[in-house]
Image (cartoon, rainbow, N blue to C red):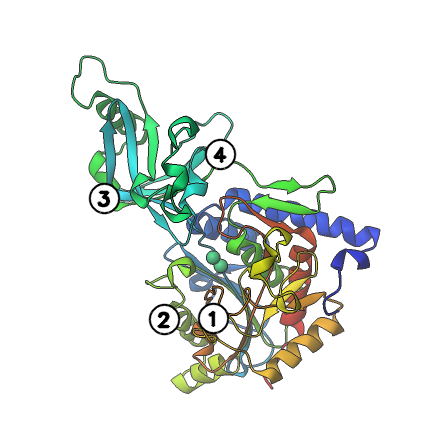
Amino acid sequence: MYNKVAWNQYDAAERVELNTFAQEYKQFLDHGKTERECVTEGVKLLESKGFISLDKAGTLKPGDRVYVEWMHKDLMAFVIGKRPLSDGMNILGAHIDSPRIDVKQNPVYEDDGIAYLDMHYYGGIKKYQWVAQPLALHGVIVRKDGTKVTLALGEDDADPVFYISDLLIHLAQEQMEKKAGKVIEGEELNLIIGSEPASGEEKEAVKKALLTLLKDEYGIEEEDFLSAELEVVPAGKSRDLGFDRSMIMGYGHDDRVCAYPSLRAVADFSGMPERTLCAILTDKEEIGSVGATGMNSHFFENVCAELMEAAGVSGEIHLRRMLRNSCMLSSDVSAGFDPNFAGVFERKNAAFIGHGICFNKFTGSRGKSGSNDANAEFVAQVRRIMDDNDVDFQTAELGKVDVGGGGTIAYMCAKYGMNVIDAGIAVLSMHAPYELISKADLWEAYKAYLAFLKDADNQ
Ligand code: MN
Ligand code: MN
């Protein structure tokens, strides 16, 4: 149903299902704090549901369940349908990278007895939100010989955490007069990592002690940071929020709150699908979908070509038809209407938490620039599918016209000529260390994805 409060339609049994799903999502969030960790968790989920790696699958036939991992940062899952691949797929896409602070290549230094890692933020953040709170360090360090150290430090109660200091209020008279974008500057994002000096050393004694510790505990040298991907994220778990536990506060809802139910919908789909089903979880959306793992890369098209080959179909025209005939829900979070900041929204076209999955016919900024703008015919099909399957949905724009804007992966998939619409879940405090969503919207999104996989077709 369009624009109703989703909570009102749940009976006791559905509330149990909703809460179980929310618990499982929170587990995914807590174990998947980086794109690499999300891929690892995703592969575990897929394998537990009978999916195998495409390169081990042999000749594909209807009903086969396969996945492809790309550079440990993208994940694609497929359930092969009854109809030929060139009839197109029903695709669910979302991204698994989230705003964070990355460690620089040459990061370690000591200043007046405190050792630090120098950092460079990733994606759009309000830098002042990331100081004076517990931070965790996740990622990989790849040694010159190719061996790898994987870190996730700061999540276990026994782990240490890390910290970026803020100026004490007593001396902040000048800082408090600054514009919010300047309160904490990019080069002030320095992560405190230690303070105990090596004995008998005078110069850089703390840094020396820490480098010895890193060598002893992890087998890494200072130069190994050159080939590392270390991401600093808020330490701690996602939590139920409110006396009624109707919401979830967590790091990285953008866009794992869409990625998880998308992957689950393909993994949980029961029976033999008519068309082939696909979930794409992609990297680098927060910095423009660039690079070999961003949606702008040809990795997805390459995988589709491999799929055709494995299904015994040759000739590029079939690949072109497969892509062209596909339909996609490109899911990314929507700006949830925030009564605290009502002025930036236009109520008739805003996403309200608890009103179900949100569809954005278009996104973009300054006159829809950069937007996909789904075809009305396809939007009508999506409305029909939602109503036929009792899914609560709403439609929205990202704020008032000309107040701001943002992009998604939709237009990059639409370049193949397929029907794509932006979909997603309303989030409060998007890109903050902890973001807020409604459990009802998570649940409605999952129901919407299952319905789309079952009923969407190229028309
Ligand atoms: Mn984002
Ligand atoms: Mn996003």
Nearer-the-camera pick, 419 or 51: 419
State the CA–CA distance, disc 4 to disc 3: 25 Å
Q: Are marks 4 and 1 in contact (CB under 8 Å)?
A: no
Image quarter (top left, top right, bottom left or bottom right) of the N terminus: bottom right
Secondary structure of residue under mark 4: loop
Q: Say which of marks 4 and 2 sits in front.
A: 4
Q: Is residue 301 above or below residue 444?
A: below
Residue tagged 3: 226
Q: Are marks 1 and 3 in contact (CB under 8 Å)?
A: no
Count neighbours of disc 4 (C-alpha within 10 A) and say few if under 14, some if 14 to 19, many if 20 or more.
Answer: many
Task: Classify residue 433 as left or right of residue 113.
Answer: right
Count neighbours of disc 1 (C-alpha within 10 A) and say few if under 14, some if 14 to 19, many if 20 or more.
Answer: many
Q: Are marks 4 and 3 in contact (CB under 8 Å)?
A: no
Q: Report the amino acid beneath label 4.
A: Glu
Q: Which mark is residue 364?
A: 1
Q: Is residue 310 visible?
A: no
Q: Residue at x 64, y 53 (%)?
A: 339
State the CA–CA distance, disc 1 to disc 2: 23 Å
User: Looking at the rendering, which quadrant does residue 115 occupy?
Assistant: top left
User: Looking at the rendering, which quadrant does residue 8 occupy?
Assistant: bottom right
State the CA–CA distance, disc 4 to disc 1: 36 Å
Specify which label sits upstream in the sequence, 3 or 2: 3
Residue 394 x/y as whole percent: 67, 67
Count neighbours of disc 3 (C-alpha within 10 A) and say few if under 14, some if 14 to 19, many if 20 or more.
Answer: some
Specify which label sits upstream in the sequence, 1 or 3: 3
Residue tagged 4: 155
Residue tagged 2: 298
Nearer-the-camera pick, 373 or 72: 373
